[in-house]
Image: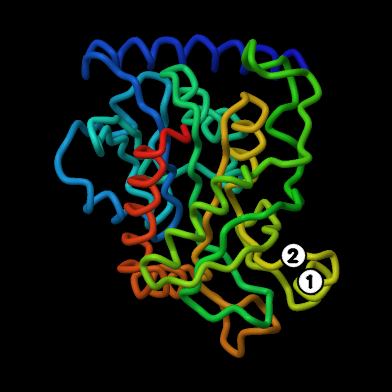
Amino acid sequence: MAETVISAERDKDSVTEAGAFLSERWGRLDPAVCLVCGSGWGKVVEDFGSGESLSYSEIPGMSQTTVSGHAGNLHLRELGNKQFLVFQGRRHFYEGVGWGPIRFPILLAKELGTETLFLTNAAGGLSPSFKVADLMVLRDHLNFMPGNPLIGPVLHPDSPRFPDQSQVYDPELRRLLCEVGEKHGVRIHQGSYLALSGPAFETPAEISAFAKLGADAVGMSTVPEAMLGNALGMKVVGLSCISNLAAGISEEPLSHDDVEKASAEALPKMKRVVRGFLEELLAQGLD
């Protein structure tokens, strides 16, 4: 426990330092939304023009990504004269570095005043109605990761010791995301996402069990960030790209290469939905 306390205190100090560094480097910062790009989602930033960008390794307290499809860059962009952050890539529990690097981007976004958290990922589909390259907005989640990112000292004054999780994913933002999808000719399913530590893909028996528990998609990320964002009082919305059908449903062996290929196939509609959602969100002032 002493090590957990030290780690949490180090996180707080590093986040404060990182926030000051970005403010000095980029000037006045008032980002309304923070977008976190999961596997295959990083190229959506191409649709937002030029702006400020830094490698994670340049930012005090941040660590560089290690997984293919996670570029490891922080971007500051604007739509309608409103700023938003794009974390192009994330750290994962299976990388063996603990919760600190996973929590850091969310705590940094909070430090900079962000109130809305938009999380994306690639996921394996369990629902029989899903096809590869479909999109699913997260209605709820099941946390099957070992442990909890909120264990240890309370990380922020806005976070209660025992956060309620009755509605982690904001219903108004979910509705808006589905409306944007319809407007742009993209069907967006709604479902529950089950998070595991990875890095191995799931067995057919596990997938069968998870489906019985109510999971519609399965992955190795997002839930820790959503839990933390919710605990910090941020409005959270999550969007999955169904990059493969899960073990026992798919007839082929699973690989990360296939995940990246499916995400590339879905990229045009991912771009339309993300940009359209951010435009609507910022215009309506839902942040």
Q: Is residue 64 above or below residue 171?
A: above
Q: Is residue 75 above or below residue 263?
A: above
Residue 253 in the image, given as x and y percentages of width and height: 57, 82
* Mark seen at residue 211: 1
Identify the amino acid type marked 1.
Ala
Q: Residue furthest front?
A: 284
Binning the other alpha carbons within 10 Å of mark 2 as few (below 14), some (14 to 19) or many (20 upward) gives many
Q: Is residue 15 above or below residue 275?
A: above
The structure residue drawn at horizontal position 42% and vertical position 21%, both measured from the top left corner, is 61
Q: Secondary structure at mark 2?
A: loop
Residue 286 in the image, given as x and y percentages of width and height: 47, 35
Binning the other alpha carbons within 10 Å of mark 1 as few (below 14), some (14 to 19) or many (20 upward) gives some
**From mark 2 to mark 1, how far is it between C-alphas?**
5 Å
The structure residue drawn at horizontal position 50% and vertical position 27%, both measured from the top left corner, is 115
> Which quadrant would residue 244 be assigned to in this image?
bottom right
The structure residue drawn at horizontal position 69% and vertical position 54%, both measured from the top left corner, is 196
Q: Residue furthest left?
A: 50
Q: Secondary structure at mark 1?
A: helix
Residue 125 in the image, given as x and y percentages of width and height: 62, 73
Query: Do callouts 2 and 1 mark residues in contact (Cβ within 8 Å)?
Result: yes
The structure residue drawn at horizontal position 71% and vertical position 52%, both measured from the top left corner, is 141
> Which quadrant would residue 93 be assigned to in this image?
top right
Q: Quadrant of the N terminus?
A: top right
| Horizontal relation, residue 10 to residue 150: left or right | left
Residue 14 in the image, given as x and y percentages of width and height: 46, 14
Identify the amino acid type marked 2.
Ala
Q: Which residue is mark 2?
A: 215
* Count of marks overlaid on the render: 2
Task: Please name the colour scheme applied to the rendered image.
Answer: rainbow
Looking at the picture, tell me which residue is in the foreground, 154 or 60.
Answer: 154
